[in-house]
Image (cartoon, rainbow, N blue to C red):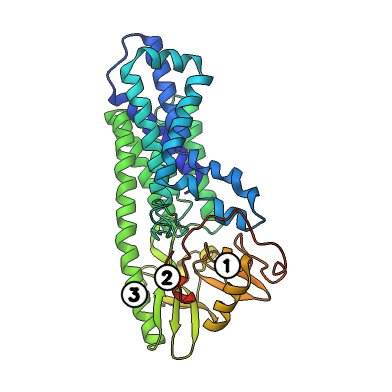
Amino acid sequence: MDNLSHSLVGLALGELADRALPAEPDPQRARTRRRVLLATGLLSSNFPDLDLFLTPLLAEPLGYLMHHRGHTHTLLYALPQVALLLALLWLLWPGARRLLAGSAAARRGVLAASVAGMLLHLAMDALNVYGLHPFHPLDARWLYGDMVFIIEPVFWCSFGVALAMLAPGGRPRRVLLVLLAAAPVLFTLQGFLQWGSLLGLGLLGGAVALAARLRGAAAGLLAALAASLGFVGVQAVAGNEARAQVRAAQLRLDPGSRILDLPLSAFPSNPLCWAFATVSDDGRKGSYAVRLGVLSLAPGLNPVAHCPARFGGGAAGPAALAWNAHTGGSLAQLRALQRDNCHFDAWLRFARVPYLAGGIATDVRYSRPGEANFSSLPYAERAGQPCPAPLPRWGRPRADLLGLEPD
């Protein structure tokens, strides 16, 4: 997920932790505890993304592909991150050190918030099509949620509004609420959101604000949590239905193929529109195929033509499904390239939907075939260069196409 969502969730975590603990008898200590818990929630919810400092260890794009959502996004390495965060709070914040030395409740709260923040980061990142491998080194395979867009305004409008209602009344609160409202409006005008999604976000923010106003700040935070969990649940159900419909459409289109994977990418704040890819092989022909498209789960209400064109929608007509691209290649050539080009082999430890053209490999989860994105690797020009190292041994998402056992 985006770091704004992580930050808002972390701040909400810190606020709820402070309210759940017994009150501190000293007002100054109580104020310090709240600040420390807010900082702990904020930092722990962003700490795993410090892996971005590791990306220079390999040449682009492999540095980013191999190290972002890498070791710091595993359950094993969450433990030293918690220890590092607690050590930094203790060493760099004298007020926090005095508080923790004298308050058992504060110590419990800070430890719980730091662990929960790390776990929430992993859980939120697991929701989208990018994936992560949280159980490494026991299991190096990538796991994908395929249900929530990687930048999701629902989290902004739920937790953001709940936190804004905690601001002092008057101008600071109004400024925060206006900023929170302006972002979805801007995204809608730019074609990233449908007007119906904007309306839904407005109703969501209004409901959270009303809960906070009528029942208190804690009620607003809990309403934001309930709304976010409900949204994820709706996306999970809608994603399962979308996958079933795409699978059926693919088999009608190509009855002899074997579908190996069906990555789904949700549209932001929109459970009806889904971008998808299918990866299939045909053993009789010795080939593999990749197809991209967009699906609407309610074509009578919201045909594919109405899905935001920024993410592949906008196809003409009232159809429920539009196929946008079809590509593929020879299994023998793909396997030979994996054996002979160590740069390409390293790239295959990330790529889920490979597209090869002109000596460049691109994962087309993030763009149409022929368009470069952050995953594009010029493997042909690197063929004679030293192999990339050190290389994390993540599982190859397309081991099935390569004829290899899963890592």
Q: Is residue 222 left or right of residue 346?
A: left
Whether residues under marks 1 and 2 lie with C-beta atoms below 8 angstroms apart, the answer is: no
Q: Is residue 248 left or right of residue 392?
A: left
Q: Residue 1: x, y in percent? A: 47, 49
SS for dot 2: loop
User: Which residue bears the numbered disc 3?
Assistant: 245
Whether residues under marks 3 and 1 lie with C-beta atoms below 8 angstroms apart, the answer is: no
Q: Please state which of the two labelled residues, at mark 3 or mark 2, is closer to the viewer.
A: 2
User: Which residue bears the numbered disc 2?
Assistant: 405
Q: Amino acid at mark 3?
A: Gln
Q: Please state which of the two labelled residues, at mark 3 or mark 1, is closer to the viewer.
A: 1
So how many labels did they put on this image?
3
Q: Residues within 10 Å of mark 1 (few under 14, many from 20)?
A: some
Q: Residue 105: x, y in percent? A: 31, 19
| 80 over 397 or under it: above or below | above
SS for dot 1: helix
Of the residues under marks 1 and 2, which one precedes in the sequence?
Answer: 1
Q: Is residue 376 left or right of residue 236?
A: right
Q: Amino acid at mark 1?
A: Asp
| 299 over 188 or under it: above or below | below
Q: Quadrant of residue 205?
A: top left
SS for dot 3: helix
Of the residues under marks 3 and 2, which one precedes in the sequence?
Answer: 3
Q: Residues within 10 Å of mark 3 (few under 14, many from 20)?
A: some
Viewer-proximal residue among 162 and 317: 162
User: Which residue bears the numbered disc 1?
Assistant: 345
> Residue at point 33% right, 28% down?
17
Viewer-proximal residue among 202 and 83: 83
> Residue at point 47% right, 53% down?
150
Whether residues under marks 3 and 2 lie with C-beta atoms below 8 angstroms apart, the answer is: no
Quarter holding the C terminus is: bottom left
